[in-house]
Image (cartoon, helix red, strand yellow):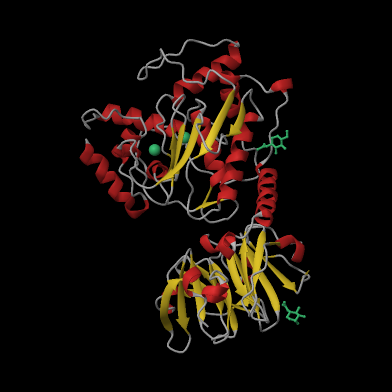
C-alpha cells in the first residue's frame, strides 16, 4: 500500500514534499501500529482529512489534497476533531450535551481546567522578535479568549504557571513525532489540559505585523485554544482550523471557536462578548508595539531592529539610512547616530504599516514605497497626485522582495523571487525586455528583504541577518557577512567599539 501512495506523491513532484502516509499517521487519520494500511483504510483517512480541510470529499489523493498536506499548519493531531464538532452542533440544535463517544482516548478524564483563573509564563524567546513584542502578542492572544468566555488570565513571569509557552528547535523531549521541522510545515503544537504546554518552532520567522513570516499572535491564539481543551475545527474561518492563516479583515474568532470555549467555561461576566475584526486587532497590536518600542531603554546601546529582520531599508540624499519595520522607522545619520523609533504615519500619513519595499530615488528626489498590489510615491512628506497606483499598471509584480535605485541602469530595480523588473521613473513604465532572471546579479540570493546603494557606490542587499555586497564594476558579489556586526552604518555597532 505504501508504495502506491509514494507513486502518487511523486507525480506532484517538488510541490508536495510530504509523504501522505506519514502525514495521515502523524495527524491521527491512520493508526501508527505497524505502518501497514489497506486501500479502504487509506480511502477513509483521506476522506476524513478532506472533510476537515474543506476539500471535495472524494477519498482520492489528488493534487489539491497533496498540496493541502504541505500547507503550514499546527502540529496537533486532528484525531477526534470531527466527533467534537458534531457534538457542538448537536448542542446547538438540542441544547443538551451528549455523552462523549471518543474511541481512541480515555473518556474518564474530561479535558478541561476546573478553575477559571489561569496563569501563564513565557519560558524563553524566539530570535527575530523582541521580548516586549512577544509579550504583547501573547497577552493579546489570551485576551482574545478571555473576552468571549468565563476565563481570566494573568502572566506569572517567574512561574510557576498553569500554561507555559516555549520556543524550541527540532526534537525537544516530547517524542520524535513532535520534533519541529524548521521554517514552514509545522509551526507549533500544544497539549490539551491540564498539561498546560504550548511549543513553538524557534526556527520560524515570527512577526507581529510583517508580510513575510508567520504572525505570532495568530499562532499563539490557536495554540492557547488547545491548552484550554479545544481541538481542530472544520469551519472555514475558525481560529481552530489546523491551517495557518494571516490576520485578515475577518473576525479572528468564528462562532465555532466561541461555542467551543463557552461549552467548557461559560460566557464572560455580564454575557458581554468582545470580538474584534483582524484589522482592528492589527491596529491595536501596532499601537502597543509602538508604545513598547518608545518606552524601552535601548538595550546595550543598540536599536531593536539590530537583532531582528526589517521590512525595508533605503538611503536618502543626506546619506541617512532609513530602516523600516512594522509601524515605525529609524534613521542612522551619516555620522552614525541612530534615532529613536518614529511612527511611519507621522512622516507619511497615507502609508500603511509593514511596507514590503522602500526606495529613495536620487534621480527625482522622491520616495517610493511598495506593499501588496500598490505603490506610493512621495515628494518629501506629501503623496504625489495619482498615487497609490496599482503595481500591475506599471508592469511590476505584487509583493516585491526589495526595490532600489540603480545608477548604472539609471532606473529603479525591483526584485521578486527568481526575477527582477526595471522601472523607468520618468514614464512609470517597465523598461522593455524585462523582467529578467535574477541570475544576472551574480552571487545575489533570492528573497532579499532590502537593498541600497551606499556612498561607496556599491549595492548592499540584505536577507534576515546576512548581507551581500554587489560591486557594479565587477558585476558580482564581492563580500558577504552579518550586517549588524560588520556594517557600522547600520547603527548596530556601539560607537565605542567602532574601528574608525
Ligand atoms: C478585549 O476587550 C477589551 C475591552 O473590553 C479590548 O480593549 C481589547 O482590545 C480586547 N482584546 C482582544 C484581543 O480582543
Ligand atoms: C537633508 O538635509 C537638509 C539640511 O540639513 C534638510 O533640510 C533636508 O530636509 C534633509 N533631507 C532629507 C531628505 O532628510
Ligand atoms: Zn492546532
Ligand atoms: Zn513540543
Would residue 254 appear left or right of 172 to someone viewing this image?
Answer: right
The x, y position of residue 289, in whole percent, is: 65, 51
The x, y position of residue 361, in whole percent, is: 65, 79
The x, y position of residue 332, in whole percent, is: 63, 73
Above or below, 253 relative to 289: above
Q: How many marks?
A: 0
Q: Residue at x 57, y 74 (%)?
A: 495
Q: Nearer the viewer, residue 489 or 474?
A: 489
Q: Nearer the viewer, residue 355 or 120?
A: 120
Q: Residue at x 53, y 75 (%)?
A: 488
In the picture, which quadrant includes the N terminus? top left
The x, y position of residue 363, in whole percent, is: 66, 84
Above or below, 204 relative to 310: above
Q: Nearer the viewer, residue 209 or 23?
A: 209
Above or below, 407 relative to 179: below
Considering every residue shown, the one lying at the far bottom of the view is 473
Considering every residue shown, the one lying at the far front of the view is 496
Would residue 266 appear left or right of 3 to someone viewing this image?
Answer: right
Q: Residue at x 67, y 64 (%)?
A: 340
Q: Nearer the viewer, residue 47 or 403?
A: 403
Q: In this orientation, does residue 435 appear?
A: no
Ligand 4 appears in which quadrant?
A: top left
Q: In this orientation, does residue 360 appear?
A: yes
Amino acid at each position: 500500500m505504501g508504495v502506491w501512495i509514494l507513486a502518487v506523491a511523486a507525480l506532484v513532484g517538488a510541490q508536495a514534499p510530504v509523504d501522505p502516509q506519514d502525514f495521515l499517521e502523524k495527524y491521527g487519520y491512520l493508526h501508527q501500529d505497524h505502518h501497514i494500511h489497506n486501500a479502504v483504510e487509506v480511502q477513509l483517512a483521506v476522506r476524513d482529512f478532506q472533510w476537515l480541510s474543506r476539500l471535495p470529499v472524494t477519498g482520492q489523493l489528488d493534487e489539491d489534497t497533496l498540496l493541502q498536506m504541505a500547507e503550514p499548519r499546527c502540529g496537533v493531531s486532528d484525531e477526534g476533531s470531527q466527533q467534537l464538532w458534531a457534538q457542538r452542533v448537536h448542542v446547538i440544535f438540542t441544547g443538551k450535551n451528549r455523552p462523549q463517544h471518543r474511541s481512541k482516548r480515555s473518556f474518564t478524564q474530561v479535558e478541561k481546567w476546573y478553575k477559571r483563573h489561569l496563569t501563564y509564563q513565557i519560558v524563553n524567546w524566539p530570535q527575530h522578535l523582541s521580548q516586549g513584542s512577544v509579550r504583547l502578542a501573547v497577552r493579546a492572544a489570551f485576551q482574545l479568549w478571555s473576552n468571549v468566555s468565563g476565563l481570566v488570565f494573568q502572566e506569572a513571569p517567574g512561574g510557576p504557571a498553569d500554561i507555559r509557552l516555549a520556543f524550541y528547535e527540532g526534537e525537544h523531549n516530547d517524542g520524535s513525532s513532535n520534533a519541529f521541522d524548521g521554517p514552514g510545515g509545522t509551526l507549533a503544537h500544544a497539549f490539551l489540559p491540564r498539561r498546560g504546554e504550548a511549543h513553538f518552532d524557534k526556527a520560524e520567522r515570527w512577526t507581529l505585523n510583517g508580510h513575510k513570516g508567520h504572525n505570532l499572535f495568530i499562532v499563539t491564539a490557536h495554540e492557547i485554544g488547545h491548552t484550554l481543551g479545544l481541538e481542530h475545527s472544520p469551519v472555514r474561518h475558525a481560529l481552530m482550523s489546523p491551517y495557518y492563516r494571516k490576520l485578515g479583515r475577518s473576525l479572528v474568532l468564528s462562532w465555532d471557536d466561541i461555542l467551543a470555549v463557552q461549552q467548557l467555561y461559560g460566557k464572560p461576566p455580564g454575557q458581554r462578548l468582545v470580538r474584534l475584526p483582524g484589522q482592528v486587532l492589527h491596529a491595536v497590536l501596532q499601537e502597543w508595539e509602538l508604545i513598547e518600542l518608545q518606552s524601552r531603554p535601548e538595550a546595550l546601546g543598540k536599536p531593536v531592529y539590530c537583532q531582528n529582520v526589517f521590512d525595508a531599508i533605503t538611503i536618502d540624499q543626506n546619506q541617512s539610512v532609513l530602516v523600516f519595520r512594522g509601524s515605525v522607522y529609524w534613521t542612522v545619520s551619516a555620522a552614525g547616530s541612530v534615532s529613536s523609533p518614529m511612527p511611519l504615519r507621522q512622516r507619511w500619513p497615507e502609508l500603511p504599516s509593514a511596507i514590503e519595499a522602500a526606495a529613495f530615488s536620487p534621480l527625482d528626489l522622491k520616495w517610493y514605497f511598495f506593499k501588496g498590489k500598490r505603490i506610493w510615491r512621495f515628494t518629501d512628506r506629501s503623496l504625489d497626485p495619482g498615487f497609490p497606483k496599482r503595481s500591475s499598471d506599471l508592469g511590476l509584480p505584487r509583493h516585491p522582495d526589495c526595490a532600489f535605485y540603480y545608477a548604472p541602469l539609471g532606473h529603479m530595480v525591483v526584485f521578486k523571487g527568481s526575477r527582477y523588473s526595471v522601472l523607468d521613473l520618468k514614464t512609470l513604465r517597465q523598461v522593455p525586455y524585462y523582467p529578467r532572471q535574477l541570475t544576472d546579479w551574480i552571487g545575489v540570493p533570492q528573497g532579499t528583504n532590502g537593498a541600497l546603494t551606499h556612498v561607496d557606490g556599491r549595492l548592499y542587499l540584505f536577507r534576515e541577518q546576512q548581507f551581500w555586497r554587489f560591486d557594479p564594476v565587477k558585476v558580482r558579489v564581492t563580500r558577504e557577512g552579518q550586517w549588524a556586526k560588520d556594517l557600522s552604518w547600520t547603527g548596530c555597532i556601539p560607537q565605542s567599539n567602532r574601528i574608525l
